[in-house]
Amino acid sequence: EQRGVDELRKYYEVYETIGSGGFAKVKLGRHILTGEKVAIKIMNKKDLGEDLPRVKVEIEAMKNLSHQHVCRLYQVIETSTHIFMVLEYCPGGELFDYIVAKDRLSEEETRVFFRQIASAMAYVHSQGYAHRDLKPENLLIDENRNLKLIDFGLCAKPKGGLSYELMTCCGSPAYAAPELIQGKAYIGSEADVWSMGVLLFALLCGYLPFDDENCMALYRKIARGRYDNPRWLSPGSVLLLNQMLQVDPKRRLSVRQLLDHPWVMKDYNSPVEWYSRQPLGHIDEDCITEMAVNMKRSRESTTALVKEVCEIYTYHISLFLLKRLASPSEEKRSTAERGRGTQHCRDRRA
Ligand SMILES: Cn1cc(Br)cc1C(=O)Nc1[nH]nc2c1CN(C(=O)N[C@H](CN1CCCC1)c1ccccc1)C21CC1
């Protein structure tokens, strides 16, 4: 038990618990070398039981996803007893709590968030994944009030691509598409669009379009697809919701059609940018130049060094490290600390 945490404490200070869910808890942490705050998702393998595959699914997915509106997975530390996922820290907490605190959001504020959700989903789908558990609890607010998508434990990456049908019924009932809860074969990306429609309704209204304490009654409401539009919704909002909450998935808007939908474009007059701003394996030329100057090395040898360091660390950690190495304040850091840094690399290689 303790050995697992010791491994983690080599690289991170671990502070209080900021979230606890079924089989995991999330603690605030700080990367010792870089001082960056992180969120550490801690799972005890014994408690995971049959949920262990879900964790592996989430780790595999997040390793392949790098996008400005998807929560970053920096590092995974696995010991005999624990799995630690070191993730991006979002000081704004869950979008769910934000909506509850404000009762409901204005159309303008909803549009800002909805464009970010569409950006994240277009990217996730472009990588062949369906999230399948989209809800305000799974969208975090970062320090710049940007949304970050989390909880990929239920996501799917069909072998044959996203047009392949899925069978497993999962996710939170209130956000689940009719075809999904009726146990029919469904397309993951189409079910995600339905969930985005429920999410859009929750943002604009502050409550759910389909709700009932009784699970079967809830299922009937979703399968019927009838809901009331409150009087404060604009005609544009009513229309978009109607196009997303279509019971027949073939009549439902696609994520691509959302990106330049009139409601989404209002006030922006430009489609949603969904390309990743930090594609995986991207080496920043400016960073290389700055480093080469600071370390009095050629650009070629500096690039070779960066590729070497990136092999040892996950891409994001090395980004932190390289910025610290490149920045002039580096000169002031004690040699001991710098030595520890190098030592750190050797440990990782060992
Ligand atoms: C609640 N809160 C308040 C402040 Br201020 C910051 C936070 C906060 O949680 N920030 C935060 N940053 N990064 C993360 C988090 C939470 N977080 C999460 O992954 N949070 C999820 C939240 N899920 C939504 C539905 C069920 C659980 C979680 C998953 C398993 C156990 C506990 C929490 C990460 C690691 C990605």
Image (spheres, grey):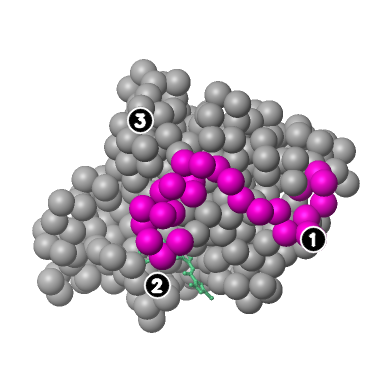
Tag 1 residue: 232
Q: Is residue 313 located in the magenta-colored stretch of the structure?
A: no
Cα separation, mark 3 vs mark 1, equals: 35 Å
Residue that carries the numbered disc 3 in the rendered image:
184
Amino acid at the residue labelled 3: Lys
Task: Kindly state the secondary structure of the residue where label 2 is placed.
Answer: strand
User: Which image quarter: residue 343?
Assistant: bottom left
Amino acid type, mark 1: Trp
User: Which residue corresponds to the image point at 58% horizontal and 55% vertical from the top-left?
Assistant: 209
Residue lying furthest bottom in this view? 16
Q: Residue at x 41, y 54 (%)?
A: 217
- In percent of width and height, residue 79 lies at 16, 58
In the rendered view, does 118 fall on the left or right side of 194?
A: right
Q: Is residue 310 left or right of residue 260?
A: left
Question: Mark 2: is the Cβ under 8 angstroms from ligand 1?
Answer: yes
Q: Nearer the viewer, residue 130 or 169?
A: 169
Q: Which residue is mark 2?
A: 19
Q: Quadrant of the N terminus?
A: bottom left
Which quadrant would residue 205 be assigned to in this image? Answer: bottom right
N-terminal label among 2 and 1:
2
Real-space Cα separation, disc 2 to disc 3, in angstroms: 34 Å
The residue stretch that appears in magenta: 212-237
Residue 348 drawn at (x, y percent): 27, 52
Measured from the top left, where is residue 325 in percent x and y? 53, 56
Q: Residues within 10 Å of mark 2 (few under 14, many from 20)?
A: some
Q: Quadrant of residue 90?
A: bottom right
Q: Is residue 45 toward the left or the right of residue 73 in the image? A: left
The count of marks equals 3
Q: Is residue 190 above or below residue 39?
A: above
